[in-house]
Amino acid sequence: YPPPQGYPPEGGYPPPQGYPPEGGYPPPQGYPPAGGYPPPQGYPPAGGYAPPVSQQPMSGGQPPVADGGWMNLPTGPPANCPPGLEYLTSIDQLLVHQKVELLEALIGFESKNKFTVKNSLGQKVFYAAEQSDCCTRNCCGPWRPFGMKILDNFKNEVIHLERPLACDSCWFPCCLQKMEVYAPPGCLVGTVEQDWSILAPAFSIKNAAGDTVLRIEGPVCTMSICGSDVEFNVLSKDGSTKVGRISKQWTGLLREAFTDADYFGITFPMDLDVRMKAVMLGACFLIDAMFFEKSGNQERDGPGMF
């Protein structure tokens, strides 16, 4: 029988109008709902908390750091940007750190150079590894020809450098130093070419067509004096305006005396074409090989181009 008026129904009968369904009442105002009801606005889903944020944003609006301290791939790169150079679109400074090789530091046995390339926040951008054979490294020393693979976070080769065998003295103006830069490998984007000079070292940064885009002028003396950096100024193509620099940074007395593991800083305009930024990185490696590589634990820094 149906319940008398004013009493809630027993099982098997639909509730009269105005009564909640069997099995419970709606929660009073201010309490989260029991199972079976959608949560009111502002409450997380029943049974837990809202999902945590997987990556916290960095202060100052900087992008989050990728796993392992690598820089995240920027969003929205230019349409004609070579693959792998997207990292350079939002960068106007690079730090190049050479890895210390224990065998090389102890007995002077020349091993393959390895570098980590970072941005100004200390996030890794590229990893660079020299390609050369043992005989060439230890017989030709800093004059040796070599290739260099530059890899991204995914171990893809995004830039390839080639340094052919050549002289670097002012007495041989027809056979001066050169670094070819390919990005991606197999596609020439530019070259670094040594200009003939008697006193101070000079270089031209050229695009794939052979047109000069920038110039580099070094100091008369490239010797590292205690506590001081050695700066190579980057100039506009007519040489009238300084637009950046490549500086060999002082790393401490012990490191300077017993290893050739160098630290470099590179600055260039933010709006410089990414291909020319890659060529600037190649210029840094050429300058390191020419002036700051040790031969038998003796660094080659000295006066001018002699």
Image: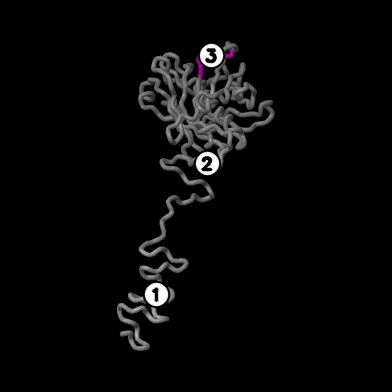
Query: Which of these two is toward me, 40 or 250?
Result: 40
Main SS of the magenta segment?
A: loop
Sequence-first tag of 3 and 1 = 1
Coordinates of residue 159 in the picture (x, y in percent): 50, 28
Q: Is residue 171 above or below residue 94?
A: above
Q: Secondary structure at mark 3?
A: loop
- Name the residue at 53% across, 28% down: 183
- Name the residue at 60% across, 37% down: 270
Report the quarter where the C terminus lies: top right
Q: Which mark is residue 74?
A: 2
Report the quarter where the N terminus lies: bottom left
- Name the residue at 67% across, 31% down: 241
Q: Secondary structure at mark 1?
A: loop
Q: Which mark is residue 167?
A: 3
Q: Is residue 254 magenta?
A: no
Number of residues whose C-alpha sits closer than 10 Å to that of mark 3, classed few (under 14), some (14–19) or many (20 or more) = some
Q: Which residues are magenta?
A: 163-171
**In the image, which is nearer the foreground, mark 1 or mark 2?**
1
